[in-house]
Image: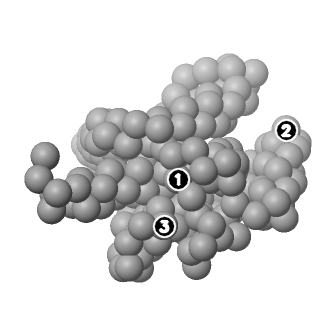
């Protein structure tokens, strides 16, 4: 491989890593950020040290994420559903932007596009999963429906690990999320169209 293509390949892999991490944060914010910060502190797959986003791997920030994760679980267990869901979506989008930008800032001079791309990837993932959980939850009993967020946490964690260790896996993951969102929107449109016809 020519030497001049190595920086381009590295940039591509960092973009894919940032995209997968931000999508994972969009699904569920805290575990992916914890995974990224923990692995970065050990210099496994990524490293925020020496960047503008070094706080992402600081012990204080990681401890705050643990506290936030526990609080979100407690709130969900007490069935205070709408507010935590809206708050988690906003936090996920924000963390997704920071993770993408931090990934770029590690090895590249220009990092700010990661903020924009991270917002977009996290918003896409969050919208796709929220729509899926809402549709699936209506077909399940209460106990099974309460377990759905746990599955989302697991998916987010797996996606974060895959994005860090094997960045190209972010491509099929994002494609699947986009397809999931498109299918959900189409079904919603068909449902509303059917309701209008009934009127």
Residue 124 shows in the view:
no
**Earlier along the polypeptide chain: callout 3 or callout 1?**
1
Q: Are marks 3 and 1 in contact (CB under 8 Å)?
A: yes
Mark 2 crowdedness (10 Å alpha carbons): few <14, some 14-19, many ≥20: few
Residue 73 shows in the view:
yes
Provide the residue designation for mark 2. 77
Provide the residue designation for mark 1. 46
| Quadrant position of residue 179 | top left
Mark 3 crowdedness (10 Å alpha carbons): few <14, some 14-19, many ≥20: many
At 30% from the left edge and 56% from the top edge, which residue is drawn? Answer: 10
Mark 1 crowdedness (10 Å alpha carbons): few <14, some 14-19, many ≥20: many
Question: Element at badge 2?
Answer: helix
Q: Position of residue 102 (x, y in %)?
A: 52, 67
Q: Position of residue 106 (x, y in %)?
A: 48, 67
| Tally of numbered discs | 3
Q: CA distance from mark 3 to mark 1?
A: 8 Å
Provide the residue designation for mark 3. 106
């Amino acid at each position: 491989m020519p030497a001049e293509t190595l920086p381009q390949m590295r940039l591509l892999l960092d973009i894919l890593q940032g995209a997968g991490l931000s999508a994972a944060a969009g699904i569920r914010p805290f575990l992916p950020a914890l995974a990224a910060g923990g692995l970065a502190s050990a210099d496994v797959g990524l490293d925020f040290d020496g960047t503008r986003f070094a706080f992402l791997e600081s012990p204080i920030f990681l401890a705050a994420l643990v506290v936030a994760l526990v609080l979100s679980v407690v709130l969900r267990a007490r069935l205070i559903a709408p507010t935590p869901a809206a708050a988690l979506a906003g936090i996920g989008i924000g963390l997704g932007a920071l993770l993408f930008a931090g990934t770029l800032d590690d090895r590249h001079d220009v990092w700010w596009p990661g903020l924009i791309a991270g917002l977009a990837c996290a918003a896409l993932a969050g919208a796709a999963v929220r729509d899926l959980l809402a549709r699936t939850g209506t077909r399940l009993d209460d106990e099974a429906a309460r377990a759905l967020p746990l599955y989302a946490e697991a998916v987010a964690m797996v996606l974060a690990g895959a994005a860090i260790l094997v960045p190209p896996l972010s491509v099929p993951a994002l494609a699947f999320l986009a397809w999931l969102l498109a299918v959900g929107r189409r079904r919603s449109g068909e449902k509303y169209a059917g309701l209008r016809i009934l009127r």
